[in-house]
Image (tube, grey):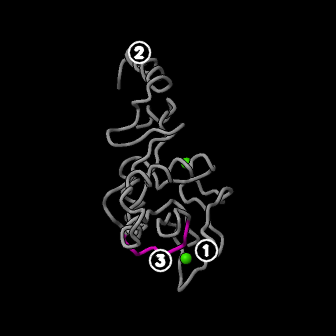
Amino acid sequence: MLPQHILLVLIIFVERGSTQDPTNCRQSWKLFQESCYYFGTQKATWPEAEAYCWSMNAALVEIETEGESNYVESQLRSIHKHASDSTADQSEVSYWLGGNDIEIEGVFKWVKSDLPMTYTDWSPGQPDDAGGEDCVELRGAFQYHWNDLPCNIPHHFICEAPAFEDIINIIGK
Ligand SMILES: [Ca+2]
Ligand SMILES: [Ca+2]
């Protein structure tokens, strides 16, 4: 247990840091608006990817606005510049997002926030549940739009964490 005055100094320090310092994002994570993003170079099934993000005090990305969607797409297009001409390379551009319809078929929601998807960016004809597809990916071969896919396929993934955590969260750690 910290003495009260040290704790108070700590709170003030943390508060200043959290509202003014964009370097709050960890190394190799990228800041956009109020979140830090991790674009994974490894591949994992949807549940493994979710567990990985949780282990980083983050969650699979939840894309809630067109602005966030455009940001994520621009990052992926920049990471995969070489993929523009080759269909084979584009198939590498496949990233799990934090949504699925495992609970109720056909009702996609963001898992971490437990909210229905308001903004969506489905590729034409998706989601189609072709052969049982419950997890949402962002797919380069579909012009960077969304697709539902079997959750057990290994893909890249994107984690998102709040860039500016509130004091309660920090002290709770
Ligand atoms: Ca988000
Ligand atoms: Ca599909």
Q: Residue 150, which numbered label?
A: 3
Residue at 39% in and 30% down: 23
Instruction: Choose between 79 and 36: the one closer to the eye.
Output: 79
View extreme (bottom): residue? 131
Which image quadrant is residue 25 in? Answer: top left
View extreme (front): residue? 85
Range covered by the magenta-colored residues = 146-154
Label whose residue precedes the other's in the sequence (2 or 3) = 2
Which image quadrant is residue 52 in? Answer: bottom left
* Ligand 2 image position (quadrant): bottom right
Label whose residue precedes the other's in the sequence (1 or 3) = 1
CB of mark 2 within 8 Å of CB of mark 1? no
Q: On the image, numbered disc 2 is attached to which residue?
A: 9
Label whose residue precedes the other's in the sequence (2 or 1) = 2
User: For the residue marked with disc 2, what is the amino acid?
Assistant: Val
> Dot 2: within a 10 Å radius of its alpha carbon, few (fewer than 14), some, or many (20 or more) residues?
few
Q: Where is residue 16 in the image (x, y as percent from the top left)?
A: 47, 20
Classify 20 as above or below 169. Answer: above
Q: On the image, numbered disc 1 is attached to which residue?
A: 127
Front tag of 2 and 1: 1
Instruction: Choose between 22 and 49: the one closer to the eye.
Output: 22
Residue at 55% in and 54% down: 62
Classify 80 as above or below 17. Answer: below
Instruction: Choose between 93 and 2: the one closer to the eye.
Output: 93
Lateral position of residue 68 relative to residue 82, left or right: right
* Separation of marks 2 and 3 at Cα, in angstroms: 49 Å
Q: Residue 49, which numbered label?
A: none
Lateral position of residue 155 relative to residue 61, left or right: left
Front tag of 1 and 3: 1
Q: Where is residue 48 in the image (x, y as percent from the top left)?
A: 37, 65
Q: Report whether the residue tagged 1 is closer than 8 Å to ligand 2.
A: yes
> Dot 1: within a 10 Å radius of its alpha carbon, few (fewer than 14), some, or many (20 or more) residues?
some
